[in-house]
Amino acid sequence: MDHTETLLDIQDLRVEFPISIGTVRAVQGVSLTLKRGEVMGLVGESGCGKSTLGFSLLRLLRPPGRIASGRILYHGRDIVAMEEKELLAVRGTGIAMIFQDPLTSLNPLMSISEHFVETLRTHEKGISRHDALERAGGMLESLGIGTNRLHEYPHQMSGGMRQRIMIGLALIMKPDLLVADEPTTALDVIVEAQFLDLLQTLRESLNLAIILITHNLGNVAQLSDRITVMYGGTIAEVAPAQALFDEPLHPYTQGLLASIPNIRLEQPRLHTMPGSTPDLVDPPSGCIFHPRCGRAMDICSRQRPPAFLRNGHEVSCWLYGDAP
Amino acid sequence: MKNLFRYILTRTLMTIPMVLILLTIIFVVLRLMPGDPVSAMLGGHAPEKVIEQKREQLGLNRPMHVQYADYIWKVCHMDLGESMVLQQEVTVAIAEKLPATIELTAFGMLITLVIGVLLGAYAADKRRTIRDSAIRLYGIVVYCIPVYWLGLMLQLVFGIWLDWLPIAGRTGPRIFASDFQNTGFYLVDTLLVRDWEAFRDVLIHLVLPSFTLGLTLSGIFVRLTRANMLDVLKADYILAAESRGIPHGRIVYRHALMNAFIPILTMMGLQVALLMAGAILTETTFSWPGMGRLLLERIYLRDYPTIQGVIIVFALMVAFISLLVDIIYAIVDPRIRY
């Protein structure tokens, strides 16, 4: 792969949460790359480690969570090993993040303008208040919010508006990667659609790479170039969006797609996957999915499958390759 | 804004019945207490006739409801009456002592807030470390220590052993009274005449009393601030601010502390009464010529009007500060509208 094109290169990342009864291995050896301007959908059920992965990209894990090993190369620099000062610069100007709940993501005691001015002044020493306000106003306008709202407080705005403000704050320093952690979960369907449109527009106009973390496969299908499916802290399958929907290879991906309700099919009951999410304190041996997998073989319980290349998919399943 | 004024007006009007009720209780309790100003003044051995004459002179021989009505009537006309033991208007006595108490309590509150809130915020930031535990221990210990004991210990250590600071009074002997004729607030007075020597002297006399008062109350603020900060630090907007690269110190001491401060404000309003109570003990320990000592002296002398007057002023101060706290609320929190 052309190195200059690679924006983010995650290598064998492991994230742990030491708790009283043991250690939760939330992310167990994830490797992933992202190109400039690429949109990556990150899907999986609750607790599969997708949000944890997203948070570790900016080292925002809440204690006791910590990155146990691995590297996160952003423009070739390892975020895991970064000094505080460099990390703060990446957080503001390189990688931005937006969160699930826009209603609680803004400081209730600060006006919208103060949020912008603070962010701008943190990263551009010496920018005047006037210039900062001007930039903030411009940003609001491009997001379809009148500049007259700049001096209002978060509680005076609707949920959709607040999520757009979060986007504005995230993008004001022109980062090249946006990590969106279930950004539409708290929004209603119409606002959600508008918001996804906005993301699409921004992505095109700013050549912004996006990691879209969601459990809503519909969202990712619409927006993503590639989709990563996670299960139990590991990557099950990575494939171009269309290919993943047309021909899911990993049994878990197949199950996930089958459990999307389809109004055109006459299904007596919705498809559900047997079993429950894996215990990440004491994960199953071999392939983490094997206890729930209908096609499990001998080797599955003994050895963790590596990623096999098949039809443009990277799939971690023994059905698609043999042990080396 | 109009609503805020209406709110202030309502609150101010509400203090009137509050003061009246308080006054009634004090009035009755004082007269139920054994002894009266006459026996306190003349002692137990004065002839019947003299006692009777004195009681008549002070109006104490009238039925209690008549005395009460008479007193309330006067209070309504802003007249707190005359002391029963000295030839002195009660308002004059209070005006003379009030600045000393305000100086003491203001500095005490300042010390409480600075030490209590900052330590609490720091402990929350460093939660579950040895420093956090040390600060929490400080909070409990200080909360349990009686004001006067702490005062005595500080006097012993800093006044006697180390001999750094004066242990009694508002000024040293060198300072002339002519400096103090403007406001009664010695810090302000000495500044007005630019007498730096005197200013310094007044300031160092303030140190031990205000620290005594401030430290005792700081314990509860340490615990309250820490608890609130722990909640606030979990909030999404803290994480969001971190994700924007805002430095950690600014997040803790601005974003988080600002939000944690709102319940602390409530507590401040509630603690003012305790502050006043603490001031009475502190003033006694440090021979501080303020309202607290005035109150205590006049209780011994059963000087009914002065005691009542002091209580009214204390009540008004508490009411005023809690009103002030409510107004600060509206300024700090944009979500609050009156």
Image (cartoon, coloured by chain):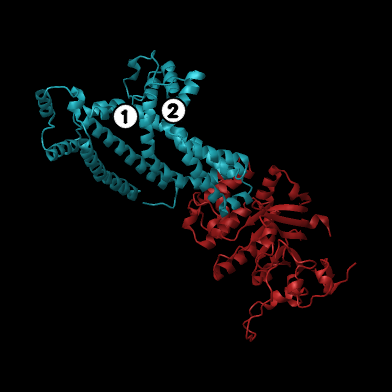
Chain colours: A red, B cyan
Which of B216/A110 is in front? B216
- For residue B151, which numbered disc appears in the image? 2
The answer to whether one can see residue B87 in this image is no
User: Which residue is outermost to the top?
Assistant: B174
Is the residue marked by circle 1 packed among few (<14), some (14-19), or many (20+) residues within 10 Å?
Answer: many
The answer to whether one can see residue B129 in this image is yes
Question: How far is mark 1 from mark 2, CA to CA?
Answer: 18 Å
- For residue B281, which numbered disc appears in the image? none
Give the residue number, with chain letter if any, for mark 1.
Answer: B291
Residue for point 64% across, 60% down: A180
Which of B2/A206 is in front? B2
**Foreground tag (1 vs 2):** 2
Q: Quadrant of the C terminus of chain A?
A: bottom right
Q: What element carries label 2?
A: helix
Vertical arrangement, residue B328 with respect to residue B310, above or below: below
User: Which residue is outermost to the right?
Assistant: A324
Q: Is residue A19 left or right of residue B225?
A: right
Residue for point 44% across, 30% down: B149
Residue for point 63% across, 54% down: A171
Q: Is residue A83 left or right of residue A113?
A: right
Residue for point 60% across, 39% down: B131
User: Which residue is outermost to the front?
Assistant: B45
